[in-house]
Image (spheres, coloured by chain):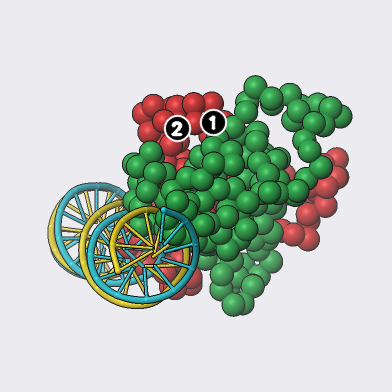
Chain colours: A red, B green, C cyan, D yellow
Amino acid sequence: MRLTTYTDYALRVLMYLGLRGDELSTIQEIAEQYGISKNHLMKLVHVLGQFGYVETIRGKNGGLRLARRLEAITVGEIIRRMEPDMALVECFRSADTQCRIVKTCILQGALGEALDRFLETLDGYTLADLLAPAEDLSRSFPVHIEHPPANVAN
Amino acid sequence: MRLTTYTDYALRVLMYLGLRGDELSTIQEIAEQYGISKNHLMKLVHVLGQFGYVETIRGKNGGLRLARRLEAITVGEIIRRMEPDMALVECFRSADTQCRIVKTCILQGALGEALDRFLETLDGYTLADLLAPAEDLSRSFPVHIEHPPANVAN
DNA sequence: TCGATACATATATCAAACATACATCTTTTT
DNA sequence: AAAAAGATGTATGTTTGATATATGTATCGA
């Protein structure tokens, strides 16, 4: 049970951009920093742009940066969007929803429920949570919010 | 995010055997019923035997059957045992636990927590639950426990 | 306006992991 | 002894995800 590196990279890119604040980063730069394929990143960044996570700017002095606030992006949402196939077992994908052998099998329901728990947990983490463990108190004590007003960054 | 067909088949085989009660089934028979590879099943059944889920009997008139009670086998346990790699992302597997870029990244912790929720949920389902939705009340009202003592096996 | 830079997009190749097949051995029953 | 059934090791096939290549398009600045 693994996520694709695509999803993995999506998280990393967004975290990287989060650290950079409003400054532009280039794909080249990110690929070098993480030591991953630039070409692979190209596609990923494009998709992230289409989903509205990042703003991409072409041309000289171009690059990309987060288009949304750190606090507005959850890990759960990213995984739901990026992961190509969340159907855990084959009978999830088949047309007929009923198992041929076990007529009353509720395995699908159980797996679906477990998957919900999985994603719900990750819905509880925003990019801001990932990048600022020191400020993690804001998660435990929602009242005491110290995250800067918003997109103020650099 | 998918489970291997190995894990999928493991669940199916155990469910099949559960329906057959104490009767012996052969690998040949199970492979035919589900329309899956007999050779693949051979290995799987062997592993299931090593884990103590099934009793295998060689020779003529041999076969296999569950070695434990339906109620004593949970979906969560099977997945934990059968799934070869539960490390969701690459940095889970790398030697150094610290991300090179984001020194304080807590993504691993978040994913680990989510995975725990996933498996915990499946720990709540036994083979008996999967096969007898009609008796699902026993899950909703834990007070009214009718499951025999446990692990009594054959 | 030209050239450099950076993202956009399509296609092609590579590689790893998983699934399947094949062959042979061992055990058990008749 | 023969047949049935699991045990086990090796080899092959297949899928799909990762990477590479190539070309296009937009933007900036000299």
Q: CA distance from mark 2 to mark 1?
A: 9 Å
Q: Amino acid at mark 2?
A: Ile
Mark 2: which secondary structure?
loop
* Residue A105 x %, y %: 54, 31
Identify the residue at image location x=68%, y=44%. B69
Question: Taking D27 as reference, is B139 left or right?
Answer: right
Identify the residue at image location x=63%, y=51%. B67
**Residue that carries the numbered disc 1 in the rendered image:** A105
Residue A124 in view of the camera: no
Question: Taking B150 as reference, is B80 left or right?
Answer: left
The residue nearer to you, when weighing A58 against A5, is A5
* Residue B127 x %, y %: 62, 39
Mark 1: which secondary structure?
loop
Mark 1: few/some/many CA within 10 Å (<14, 14-19, 20+): many
The residue nearer to you, when weighing A66 against C16, is C16
- Circle 1 chain: A
* Residue A40 x %, y %: 35, 60
Identify the residue at image location x=41%, y=30%. A100
- Circle 2 chain: A
* Residue B89 x %, y %: 54, 61
The circle on residue A101 is 2
Mark 2: few/some/many CA within 10 Å (<14, 14-19, 20+): few
Q: Where is B86 relative to A74, above or below?
A: below
Identify the residue at image location x=75%, y=49%. B151
Indicate which label's residue lies in the foreground, 2 or 1: 2
Q: Where is A101 relative to A88, above or below?
A: above
Q: Amino acid at mark 1?
A: Cys
